[in-house]
Amino acid sequence: MATTHASRAEQWFSERQGEQRKRLNTVLIGAAIVALYPLFDSLLGLGLLGSWIPIFVFVILAMGLNVVVGYAGLLDLGYVAFFVIGAYANAFMTSPSSWFVINGWIPEFLQSFWPAMALSWIIAAIFGVILGAPTLRLRGDYLAIVTLGFGEIVPDFFTNAAAITRGPQGIGQIAKPPSIPLPGGREISFATTDQWNWFWLILVVGIVSLFMITRLYDSRLGRSWQAIREDEIAAASMGINTVKAKLWAFALGASFSGFAGSVYAGYVRVVYPDQFQFSVSIIILAMVILGGIGNIYGVIIGALIIGSFDRILADALNTPLHWLGERITWEPLAWLGDFMVNHSVTSDRFLIFGLALVLIMILRPGGLFPSEQRAAELTGDDEDGTSADDGDELYDARQRDGQLVGERA
Amino acid sequence: MNVEWTQFFQYLIIGLASGSLIALIALGYTLVYGIIELINFAHGEVFMMGAFFATTVVLVSGVTDESSGALIVGMLILSLVLAMIFSAALNVGIDRVAYRRLRSAPRLAPLIAAIGMSFILQNIAIYWRGSNPFTAPDLIPREYRTYNVLQEWPVLRDWFADSTLRLRLLDLFVIGVTIPLLVLLSWFVYRTRIGTAMRATAQDRDAAALMGIDINRTIGIAFVLGGALAGAAGMVALFYNNSGRFQMGFQYGLYAFTAAVLGGIGNLAGAVVGGFLIGLIWSFSDGFVGNYIGGWGSQWTNSLIFGILILVLVFRPSGLLGQETPDKV
C-alpha cells in the first residue's frame, strides 16, 4: 500500500510541476507578445499606448485586491485608500514642492524615484496593518463598511490637510525614474511622453507582481488564507494564527496597491485627491469579481476587459455609431439617426458597464474564469450523494454555508 | 464656555430632520439585509429616483409656491404617495431582474449586480434630468421663525438666557412625514402576519420555509417596504434641500448604510438610532462645532462620521443594538 501511495504522490507532484511549467510558458509567451505591442501600436498608428499604461496600473491593483478578497476572503471596499497612500508617499518624498522636502525631512538619497517607490511599498504595507488591525474582530459586511469608511477618510484627509498635502490642487513635479544610459550615448528616459519605455517598465512591474502573488498563493501563508476564507473557525482550530494571517493579507494586499500608486504617481507626475474616488475601489473590485475571484489569471483578464472598455473601447465605439447614424436616411427613423450622430458612447460608459456587470453576474455568478479550486469548494462535497441543485428549493443551505465572506461557519 | 443655545437648537432640529431622512433610507438597507444578507448598493439610487419622480410629478401638475395652500398640501401628499409607489415598484423590479436569480450564487455575485444596478440607475437619471443639479419648486416655506418659548418657562429661562427657538416649517415637514412612516413600519413588522413572516424569514429561512411561509413573496415585500420608504425619503429630501442631482443617492445612501451598520445591520431600531445619530453628527459638525474648534467645518464631516463608525465597531463589532452572535461550528 505504502508504495502505491508514494508513487501516487510522485505522480501528483510531477503532474503539478508539468502544469506549472506549462503555465509559466504561457505567461512568458503572453508577456512577450504584450511586450511587442508598442511596435504594432506605432505601425498601425493606433496611438493607444497612453491608455494602456493606466490600464496596466489597474491590473496590478486588481491583482493586489485579489490577495485580500480572493485569497483571504476579506471584502475590502476601500482599496483605493492604499493607492492614495502609495501615490502620496512618492509625492511627499520626491516632489520639490512637498512639505516634507521643503522642511528637510527627507534625506537626499530618498528624493528619487526608485528608493521612493521601494519605501512607499513598505509605507502602504504598514498602513495596511494599521487600517486592518481594528477590523480583525469584524465579520463579513461589517468589515466591508469599515474598509469603505477608510476609503472615504483617507482621500478626505489628503483633501483637507491642505497645509501638508496642498489640498485639492495636489502635488506636482513628482520624480520620474532616472534615465538608464545605454552604450553609444543614448539613454532610456522616463518622461511622461516616453510611452514605450513606460509601457515596458509597467509590464515588468506587473510581471514581478504576478510572480510574487502566485508564489504567495502556494506558500504556507497563502494556504492559511485559503483555509481562513473557507472556514475561519476550522482554520483556527488547525493551529493557523488567523490574526497574523489576516494582517499579512491586509499588509501584502495594501503593499501592491501602494506600489501601483507610487508607479502611477511617477508616470502622471501629479497627484490630487480627486483621482481617488470611491468609484475607483468599486471598479477594481468589479475587475476582480468579473474575471473570477481568486483566480489570478482570470483577474488579470477581467481587469484588462474593464480597463480597456473604460479607456479605449467606449471612445472607439463613437465612430461606428456616428457612421451608422449618418447612414440612416429613411425619414421615419430620422430621429434615431440624429440621436446616433449627436450621441457619445463615452457618456454611456457607466450604463454599459453596469449592464455588463449585472448580466455577467446572472449568467456566470462565479465570474468569467472562476477559480477551479474555489468552484469545487463552493459547489462540491457531493459525497453525501446529493447534488447542489436538488429540486428547485429556494436556496441551498450548503451553498450559503460555503459563501465567500460567510458569517456562518 | 458660552454656548450659543439659539444656534444649538437650530442645529439640533436640522440634525433631527436629516437624521429622520437617513433613518428612512437606512431601514431599506436593513430590511433587505436582514432577510437576504445583501448590501443593496442600488438602494441610494432608488431613493434618488424617488426624488426625480416627485420632481416630475410636481412639474407636470404645474403647482407652484403661488398656488393656494390646499392645492400645495394636496400636491405634496400626492407626490409623496406617487414617489413611494414608484420607488417600491422600482426596488421590486430590480430584485426580480437581478437579485432573485442570484439567491444561491456566491455571496459577492448579488453585491456586484447591485453595484451594476446603481451605475445603470445613475445613468438613467442623467438621461432623465441631465447631469447638473436642478431646483425643485419651493413649495414649503424655508424662512426661520422665532419662537420665544424658552423665555416663557421659568426654569428654561434660567438655563437658556437670551436664547430663542428658531424653527423652519421645512424641518417640521420632514419630521412630520418621517415619524408617522417609522411608526407605520414598526406596526407592520411587529403587528401583522406578514411582518411576523418577515421576522421569521430573517431569523431562519429554512425553518420559515418549512412553516409554510412563501419566502420569495416575503423577500419581495421587504423590497417593497424598503423601496417605498426610500421613495418617501427621496421626495422629502428633494423639498428639504430644494435641489436634486443624479448623484444625490450616493451621499445619502452612504450615510444611511453607515447608519444601518452603526445601529447593527438587520436591526430595525438600530437603523433608526443610527440614522438620528448620524443626522445629528452631520448637522453639528457642519455648523456648530466650528464655533468651538478652529478650522472645523463641513469638509471634516465625512471623516468624523466614518471615524465614529470605526470606533463603535471596534468596541461593539455588531453595532450599537446588534446582537453578538457567538461563532457557530
Image (tube, coloured by chain):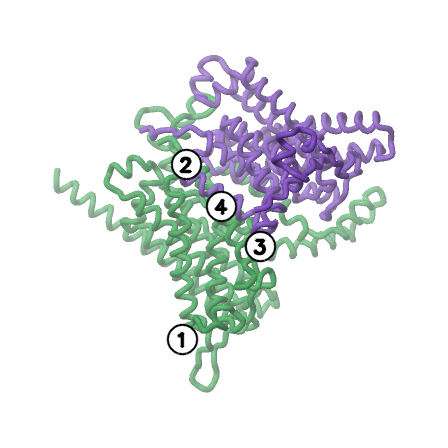
Chain colours: A green, B purple
Q: Mark 3 to mark 1: distance in Å?
A: 38 Å
From the viewer's side, name the closer residue of A161 and A278: A161
Total residue callouts: 4
| Foreground tag (3 vs 4) | 3
Mark earlier in primary sequence (2, 3): 3
**Which image quarter is the N terminus of chain A in?**
top left
From the viewer's side, name the closer residue of B217 and A120: A120
Query: In terms of image quadrants, where is residue A369?
Result: top left
Mark earlier in primary sequence (3, 4): 3
Q: Which mark is residue B307?
A: 4
Pointer 2 with pointer 3, Cβ within 8 A: no
Which residue is at 61% across, 68% downward? A45
Q: Are marks 1 and 4 on the same chain?
A: no
Residue type at tag 1? Phe
From the viewer's side, name the closer residue of A360 and B100: B100
| Foreground tag (3 vs 1) | 3
Which residue does the numbered mark 2 point to in the structure image? B317
Q: Are marks 3 and 1 on the same chain?
A: no
Mark earlier in primary sequence (2, 4): 4
Few, some or many residues within 10 Å of mark 1 (<14, 14–19, 20+): few
Q: Chain of mark 2?
A: B
Residue type at tag 4? Gly
Which residue is at 75% across, 29% downward? B79
Q: Say which element carries label 1.
A: helix
Looking at the image, residue A208 lies above or below residue B89: below
Q: Mark 2 to mark 3: distance in Å?
A: 33 Å
Question: Residue B65: x and y, percent?
Answer: 84, 35
Question: Residue B95: x and y, percent?
Answer: 58, 30
Pointer 2 with pointer 4, Cβ within 8 A: no
Q: Chain of mark 1?
A: A
Single out the residue that lies furthest toward the left: A2
